Image (cartoon, rainbow, N blue to C red):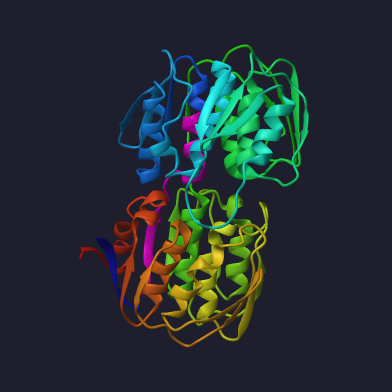
Amino acid sequence: MRYYAIEGPARLVGSVPISGAKNSVLKLMAAALMVPGEVTLHNVPRITDVVLMSEVLTRLGARVRFEGHSMTIAADGDLHDETPYDLVTKMRASIEVLGPLLARLGRARVALPGGDAIGSRPIDLHLRGLERMGAKIGAEHGYVEAIADRLHGTDIVLEFPSVGATDNLLMAAVTARGTTRIDNAAREPEVQDLAAMLCACGARIEGAGTTTITVEGVDELHPAEHTVLPDRIEAGTFAIGAAATRGDVELIGVRPEHLRLPLEKLEQAGADVTEGTSSVRVTMSGRPRAMDLAVLPYPGFPTDLQPMMMVLLSCAQGASILTENVFESRWLFVDELNRMGSQVRVEGHHAVIRGVERLTGAPVRAPDIRAGAALVLGGLVAHGRTEVHAIEHIERGYEDLPGKLRGLGARITLERA
């Protein structure tokens, strides 16, 4: 039983390097299955989910070499069409091998995904899109089965700008016969990163980052190298941590344009924000100001940063209303935060937050990746000792979070019960 022990309060001061994006690298690894040769990825974060996806690819027949922060994936041999149930159920991102396997092999049998308990995330949009491209879809015994001799281009309109569905359909369309158009596509930077990697491998994609993506199918992809974009969620976590602890932190190796709205909200809360070409400095001297905030798909405020903002607003002057419009179960960690003395009341999709002058340390449990990181920030703000349990969730998405925080002056250690 491992947990993080935090002695607070702590003021975060210094600079911190930002790792490659967890929400990008996993789909890039899946996309490598489509290339009959080696794909090399740089700036790969050393997190649990990357290890799990490496195991998925290895069990499918690819060869994976991970050295430092670079990874080479060779899918030039015979691949299997069935993903291992024991691995897929641990990580939702593994559903993104469905499109690549179907495009490469003409068939795929993928276990229904697991992952964080943050609400219903059905894959119906993935499957309906693939059916429009000519796939025959079946589901039984916890698996999705898809068959298609060769997919064909078509027009697809997504009911919701789902990142996962956009990814899967984009990858499937790359080698489909003809032209595919995806309307109401997700606009996230991670979708743009996937398109950039596929284009480096010979794909023809236009419109990534807009609501309409057009893909002209090619016969085959070729080997290439690609550098994973910086993790805007990790960067946002440290930026909010700087504001919450009234600190002074410089984020190194970021793309400020991917954090536009979160940084504006921090300024609204009273922080000073200075942007460089690949850096952001966040400074806060006083108590945060209350505000209202609504979570929306990109370029709106990211749902993955909502728990951290709740910690910030829990210490703000006045009352705030936080509205979650993406995942209905993001509130699972509210009871844990309230154990630390916050005053948060949930009403449907809204959380009413009455700011308190101080939080107090307490034993808490992380229900998912982002809530776990938020509870760590809560421990940094709180007075006394906080123990954050179930840290395996946090390790899925953050590379050496305790080490990076210690570099900023936090008193956090990894303990064993």
Taking the view exactly as shown, the residue that stands out farthest to the front is 141
Q: Quadrant of the N terminus?
A: bottom left
Residue at the spot x=39%, y=20% of the render?
61
Residue 415 horizontal side relative to residue 387, left or right: left
Total number of numbered labels? 0
Residue 358 horizontal side relative to residue 296, left or right: left
Residue 380 horizontal side relative to residue 25, left or right: left
Residue at the spot x=60%, y=25% of the render?
146
Residue 228 position in % (x across, y down): 48, 37
Q: Nearer the viewer, residue 30 or 258?
A: 30
Residue 227 position in % (x across, y down): 47, 34
Residue 190 horizontal side relative to residue 68, left or right: right
Residue 131 position in % (x across, y down): 70, 28
Q: Quadrant of the C terminus?
A: bottom left
Residue at the spot x=49%, y=66% of the render?
240
Q: What range is drawn magenta here? A: 10-30
Tell me if residue 372 is in the magenta stretch: no
**Residue 156 vertical position relative to residue 37 in the rendered view, above or below:** below
Name the quadrant containing residue 20: top left
Q: Tell me, yes or no, if residue 43 can be seen here.
A: no
Residue 140 position in % (x across, y down): 56, 34
Q: Nearer the viewer, residue 377 or 395?
A: 395
Q: Nearer the viewer, residue 122 or 2?
A: 122
Name the quadrant containing residue 68: top left
Tell me if residue 23 is in the magenta stretch: yes
Q: Tell me, yes or no, if residue 174 can be seen here.
A: yes
